[in-house]
């Protein structure tokens, strides 16, 4: 049985092997992501490598992405497990568990408050074996912008087309976003707006018994504008008079889906109005629906349902180490937190 040496190293040492792993196991991942990860404002990515001792062959990798969060207005430090990849010939008697345990051990070395991951069905058991525990359900929600693709499952294509418009009208009628007050002026984020960080400070200070992500302009610039993997839209809502910032949201379109990554404001009415604006964006680019992942304890979950977002039943689980972390219990987790 082969033996493996697991160690921390700069990704530059294994750059070509990492890119080959990405091509095989995470297709579509751009090479530029490797350099982008090193400029994370919360800290560079920690890479752990498993090498077969006799041959020196790279058998697997795992990485920890530092992530700053705020709990009751105070900064805490988490890390996301990613790039968990194993060479195909080492899947059975390989370093799968050892890599997870090594990542877990870095929690203490790097002073992370907790680690988290969202395992797929194949890796769930081994993640549990490494000491991670489920912290709750993540709901995948969808607000339809077209209904024919759903109706076709139950009726013919012609009937689906006939029923689509009245069904969409009914959804709009029942959505609380339709009736939201507090109209805003919506525009792309101003990367030179010095008042933006002050608004984010107000958001963090106002949320008690609540864990949120980092919203500073420098972080958003790195996380979204510089992201080499996806294109994002960051849209701010400002008051029609006075031009004061009311909130912002982040969306990304791919495969005829508009993904809602984050929705941030100080008032629920502003949230609803922004959801209405997001629906307008989805209509302009002809998306079939607006999608979002939300943690079971996030108040946004009930709000989205009131705005006609439906549970797709495609649930995932949030796993953490250690378990029972108070900040996780009150986490306003959204699609933005699936990654850094």
Image: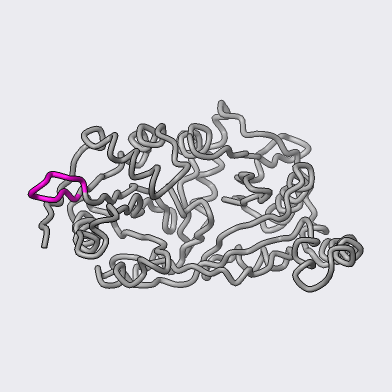
Magenta region includes residue 54: yes
Residue at 45% in and 45% down: 27
Counting from the top left corner in percent of width and height, residue 171 is at 82, 65
Q: Nearer the viewer, residue 103 or 236?
A: 103
Quadrant of the image occupied by residue 167: bottom right
Residue at 19% in and 57% down: 102
Counting from the top left corner in percent of width and height, residue 306 is at 72, 67
Q: Nearer the viewer, residue 268 or 23?
A: 23
Magenta region includes residue 291: no
Counting from the top left corner in percent of width and height, residue 218 is at 46, 34
Left of 179 or right of it: where is 136? left
Residue 248 visible within the image: no
Residue at 58% in and 66% down: 299
Residue at 65% in and 39% down: 235
Left of 125 or right of it: where is 330? right
Q: Residue furthest top?
A: 192
Left of 247 or right of it: where is 117? left
Q: Residue furthest front?
A: 89
Q: Nearer the viewer, residue 41 or 211?
A: 41
How are the colours assigned in the image?
Answer: one colour
Quadrant of the image occupied by residue 250: top right
Q: Residue furthest left?
A: 54
Residue 114 visible within the image: yes
Left of 172 or right of it: where is 217? left
Q: Which residues are magenta?
A: 50-58
């Amino acid at each position: 049985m082969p033996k493996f040496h697991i160690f921390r190293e700069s990704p530059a040492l294994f750059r070509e092997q990492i890119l080959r792993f990405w091509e095989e196991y995470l297709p579509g991942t751009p090479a530029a992501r490797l350099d982008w990860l090193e400029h994370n404002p919360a800290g560079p990515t920690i890479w752990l490598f498993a090498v077969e001792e006799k041959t020196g062959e790279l058998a697997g990798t795992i990485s920890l992405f530092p992530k700053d969060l705020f709990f009751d207005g105070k900064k805490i430090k988490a890390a996301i497990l990613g790039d968990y990849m194993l060479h195909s010939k080492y899947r059975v008697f390989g370093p799968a568990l050892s890599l997870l345990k090594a990542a877990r051990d870095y929690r203490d070395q790097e002073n992370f408050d907790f680690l988290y991951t969202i395992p797929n069905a194949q890796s769930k058991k081994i993640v549990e074996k490494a000491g991670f525990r489920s912290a709750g359900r993540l709901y995948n929600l969808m607000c339809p912008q077209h209904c024919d693709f759903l109706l076709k499952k139950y009726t013919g294509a012609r009937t689906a087309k006939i029923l689509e418009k009245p069904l969409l009208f009914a959804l709009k009628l029942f959505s609380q976003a339709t009736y939201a007050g507090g109209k805003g002026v919506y525009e792309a984020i101003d990367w030179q707006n010095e008042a933006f960080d002050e608004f984010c400070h107000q958001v963090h200070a106002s949320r008690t018994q609540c864990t949120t992500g980092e919203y500073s302009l420098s972080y958003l610039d790195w996380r979204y504008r510089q992201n080499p993997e996806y294109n994002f839209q960051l849209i701010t809502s400002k008051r029609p008079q006075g031009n004061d910032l009311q909130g912002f949201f982040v969306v990304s379109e791919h495969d005829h889906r508009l993904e809602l990554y984050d929705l941030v404001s100080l008032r629920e009415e502003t949230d609803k109005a922004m959801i209405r604006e997001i629906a307008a964006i989805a209509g302009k680019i002809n998306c079939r629906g607006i999608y979002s992942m939300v943690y079971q304890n996030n108040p946004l979950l009930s709000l989205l349902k009131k705005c006609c977002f439906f549970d797709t039943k495609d649930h995932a689980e949030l796993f953490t180490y250690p378990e029972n972390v108070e900040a996780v219990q009150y986490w306003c987790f959204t699609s933005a937190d699936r990654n850094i």
